[in-house]
């Protein structure tokens, strides 16, 4: 079984370690990481269909799932682009959430309410794209009525080059990725 290892950055420069598959190699790496103190068991997660493999990890405090919800297979030549999009993408969305919340504050909302609304708005939109079966462009068009509130906002986003800026961020991160894979 191939082992996929994913480090997920979270605030305060701490990390979580995840394994796709809980074979002997993942077990060995996990034991070494925990024993050496690099990461506590509470920051490691894995998944495996077989209960015996799950038990092996659970016995030393690792959170184990019975299955992975969704996994994509990709050629190795696409890894830099995957890193540029999915590795760096969450940070771009954090920036978008912060900007939406700041816009809410500028429009008169209390900070906590604006941040809650912004994060739930992004969560809901992501859910519609991933589960709704419609292309994001169609969902966007469904929300924007002629001469309405949303289309006025779209106009401002387009004047600022919003879509192109996001595309450029992914491309820049993709170009930077090979430098880090050589380290």
Image: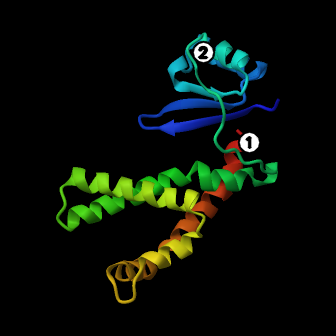
For label 1, count other residues whose C-alpha is less than 10 Å away and answer few (under 14), some (14-19) or many (20+): few
121 relative to 141, above or below: above
Q: Nearer the viewer, residue 45 or 183?
A: 45
Q: Which mark is residue 182?
A: 1
Q: Mark 1 or mark 2, which is nearer to you?
A: 2
- Is residue 46 something one can see in this rendering? yes
Colouring rule applied to residues: rainbow
- Is residue 161 something one can see in this rendering? no
N-terminal label among 1 and 2: 2
- Most extreme residue toward the bottom is 147
Residue under the image location 48 percent in, 74 percent down: 140
- Measured as percent of width and height from the top left, residue 104 is found at 25, 63
80 relative to 38, above or below: below
- Measured as percent of width and height from the top left, residue 108 is found at 17, 65
For label 2, count other residues whose C-alpha is less than 10 Å away and answer few (under 14), some (14-19) or many (20+): some
Q: Quadrant of residue 45?
A: top right
What kind of element bears circle 1? Answer: loop
- Measured as percent of width and height from the top left, residue 157 is found at 42, 76
Q: Which residue is mark 2?
A: 58
Q: Nearer the viewer, residue 110 or 52?
A: 52
Q: Is residue 3 left or right of residue 55?
A: right
Residue under the image location 56 percent in, 51 percent down: 88
């Amino acid at each position: 079984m191939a082992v996929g290892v994913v480090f997920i950055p979270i605030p305060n420069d701490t990390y979580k370690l995840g394994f796709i598959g809980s074979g002997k190699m993942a077990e060995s790496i996990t034991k070494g990481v925990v024993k050496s103190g690099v990461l506590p068991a509470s920051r490691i997660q894995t998944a495996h269909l077989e209960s015996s493999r799950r038990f092996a990890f659970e016995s030393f405090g690792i959170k184990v799932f019975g299955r992975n919800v969704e996994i994509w297979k990709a050629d190795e030549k696409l890894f830099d682009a995957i890193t540029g999009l999915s590795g760096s993408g969450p940070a771009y969305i954090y920036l978008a959430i912060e900007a939406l919340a700041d816009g809410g504050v500028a429009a008169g909302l209390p900070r906590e309410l604006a941040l809650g609304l912004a994060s739930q708005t992004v969560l809901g939109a992501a859910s519609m794209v991933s589960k709704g079966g419609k292309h994001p462009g169609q969902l966007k068009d469904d929300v924007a009525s002629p001469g309405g509130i949303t289309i006025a906002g779209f106009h401002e986003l387009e004047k600022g080059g919003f879509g192109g800026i996001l595309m450029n961020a992914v491309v820049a991160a993709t170009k930077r990725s090979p430098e880090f894979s050589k380290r």
